[in-house]
Amino acid sequence: MTNQYIIEWSPTQGLFHVHTPEEMFDKNRRAYYNRDKLDWLPIAVAADFDEANKIINTLERRRRELLPEVLTEKLKRILQRRFHAEARTK
């Protein structure tokens, strides 16, 4: 597990975190022992810190590109729920 970096994403914090697998496992074990709740999601592995930063840049760019599609899908779901709720009340 040497020379690898894990890229994690926290939805609640909106942040990336880069560390070695050993650091990740240590953090997760401490959270387990202390009954802490973590929402860090491992989303990529990099060979070194520079590659990790490049991957993060790519992920952020891709997320921005997908934003209109994501918002459209969320809006569709909201409108469908609203339509079904109104149909039940009539």
Image: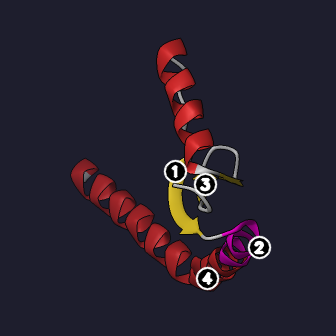
Return the disc, 2 or 4, that comes first in the chain's sequence: 2
**What residue do we see at 39% from left, 66% from top?**
77
Q: Position of residue 88 (x, y in %)?
A: 22, 51
Earlier along the polypeptide chain: callout 3 or callout 2? 3
SS class, disc 3: strand
2 and 4 marks in contact (CB < 8 Å): no
Of badges 3 and 2, the one in the foreground is 2
Residue 13 image offset from top left, x and y in percent: 70, 45
The type of residue carrying mark 3 is Trp
Disc nearer the start of the sequence (1/3)? 3
Is residue 10 visible in the rendered structure shown here? no
What's the distance in space between the residues labelled 1 and 3, CA to CA? Answer: 5 Å
First in residue order: circle 1 vs circle 4: 1
User: What main secondary structure does the magenta stretch of the protein show?
Assistant: helix
Q: Is residue 77 visible?
A: yes
Sort mark 2 into few (<14), some (14-19) or many (20+) by Cα contacts within 10 Å: few
Residue designated by label 4 = 62
